[in-house]
Image (cartoon, rainbow, N blue to C red):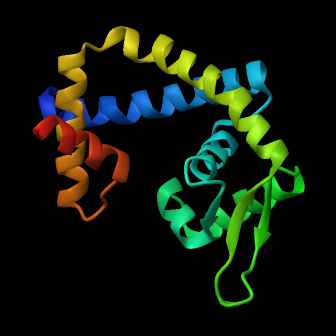
């Protein structure tokens, strides 16, 4: 069992998990303190903001890497806070959209600069451009091979390939 820790691929995978867990905790705490918004709420608002303020719930769940139920709960909490509203178009009663409110847009615009600063301080300051390119290529390949593509990572990898 301890021999696995000597395998660099095991250590790389485990390191990825530890970095993700610990940085997420730090991001969440510092975003809440500096901008009054949690990491999950900011991610929701940004995904709406980047898509013209409106997104179908099923597409939003995929973008947020959440189950449909998880996305529904996150949107419901944000709706209670006045950051989003749900909308059912009259021409397709089966579809539900999450729509960014003015308060949600303001929260996203308040939180995003804090997020960028934290990203720089907690990650980018310690990773060279070349190392980041390697990580993007690796993560894109691993996600694609496992049938879990991620649009922003795939786009970044495609740009690196040109």
Residue 1 visible in the picture: no
Q: In this view, does 75 lie above or below 128?
A: below
Q: In this view, does 96 lie to the left or right of 141?
A: right
Q: Residue at x 36, y 46 (%)?
A: 152
Q: Position of residue 108 (x, y in %)?
A: 70, 37
Q: In this view, does 113 lie above or below 126?
A: below
Q: How many marks?
A: 0
Q: In this view, does 103 lie to the left or right of 67?
A: right
Residue 15 visible in the picture: yes
59 and 70: which one is in front?
59
Q: Which residue is drawn at 80% across and 52% down?
A: 101
Q: Residue at x 78, y 36 (%)?
A: 106
Q: Where is residue 123 in the image (x, y as percent from the top left)?
A: 41, 18
Which picture quadrant has residue 114? top right
Instruction: Work out which quarter of the rendered image holds the N terminus and state it.
Output: top left
114 and 9: which one is in front?
114
Which picture quadrant has residue 148? bottom left
Q: In this view, does 143 lie to the left or right of 42?
A: left
Q: In this view, does 155 lie to the left or right of 124?
A: left
Q: Position of residue 8 (x, y in %)?
A: 13, 28
């Amino acid at each position: 069992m301890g021999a696995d820790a000597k395998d660099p691929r095991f250590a790389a995978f485990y390191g990825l998990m530890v970095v993700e867990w610990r940085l997420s905790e730090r991001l969440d705490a510092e975003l809440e303190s500096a901008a009054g918004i949690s990491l999950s709420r900011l991610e929701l608002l940004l995904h709406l903001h980047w898509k013209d303020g409106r997104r179908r719930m099923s597409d939003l769940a995929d973008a947020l890497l959440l189950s449909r139920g998880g996305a529904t709960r996150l949107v419901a909490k944000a709706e209670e806070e006045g950051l989003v509203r749900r909308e059912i178009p009259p021409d397709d009663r089966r579809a539900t959209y999450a729509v960014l409110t003015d308060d949600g847009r303001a929260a996203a615009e308040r939180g995003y600069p804090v997020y960028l600063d934290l990203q720089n301080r907690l990650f980018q300051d310690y990773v060279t451009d070349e190392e980041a390119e390697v990580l993007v290529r690796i993560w894109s390949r691993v996600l694609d091979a496992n049938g879990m593509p991620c649009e922003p990572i795939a786009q970044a990898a495609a740009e690196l390939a040109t």
